[in-house]
Image (cartoon, rainbow, N blue to C red):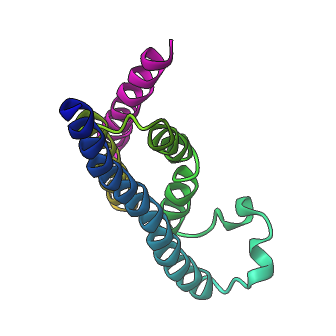
Amino acid sequence: MEDLINSVTAAASYSGDLLTALYVMAAWTAITWMLMTFVRLGAMNEAGLTPDDAKHTDELKTLPARPRQMADNYNHLFEVPVIFYAVVLAILVSGRADEIHMYCAWGFVISRVVHSLWQWSSNAVAIRFPLFALGWLFLMVMIIRELLAVL
């Protein structure tokens, strides 16, 4: 009985950590949107573009690299991180939050933040891709562990 109580207590503790990682990822997406909007509007203003000139993103190809890179990164935060959100929520619902999931979740979030910062600045793919892949590795560990737990 004591083992069960300890297990439930640990899962509850790690659940909070997983939820915090999820919230930080969501907050990072919001911060990215704010920064991207600020930089993009400034670049559009400098280029003499109006909001109507942004009806289609391909019409913004005349903007400098940095605002385009930030917009690309913002879009990337709605690709793999969406899977992260679903996996974290599934882990929380299943009650299987543990230390490994917690470290993987935070590893994923940190890799995505560093990936964003890199994409906003130099954007060298030789570095950006390994950062992207590292995040996927953390996420795959979480997915495979949960898949094995339900099979």
Q: Quadrant of residue 149?
A: top left
Residue 130 versus residue 27 in the image, above or below = above
Image position of 7 (left or right of 81):
left
Residue at point 34%, 46% (across, down): 124
Residue 92 position within the rendered picture, expressed as x and y whole percent measured from the top left: 45, 43
Residue at point 64%, 62% (across, down): 61
Residue 122 versus residue 98 in the image, above or below = below
Residue at point 51%, 47% (across, down): 85
Residue at point 19%, 34% (across, down): 2
Image position of 137 (left or right of 58):
left
Q: Residue furthest front?
A: 1
| Image quarter (top left, top right, bottom left or bottom right) of the N terminus | top left
Residue 39 position within the rendered picture, expressed as x and y whole percent measured from the top left: 49, 78
How many numbered callouts?
0
Residue 23 position within the rendered picture, expressed as x and y whole percent measured from the top left: 42, 62
Judging depth in this view, the residue of 91 and 86 nearest the camera is 91
Residue 134 position within the rendered picture, expressed as x and y whole percent measured from the top left: 31, 34
Asked if residue 139 lies in the magenta stretch, the reply is yes
Give the overall secondary structure of the magenta segment. helix
Asked if residue 91 lies in the magenta stretch, the reply is no
Residue bounds of the magenta highlight? 124-151
Q: Quadrant of residue 50?
A: bottom right
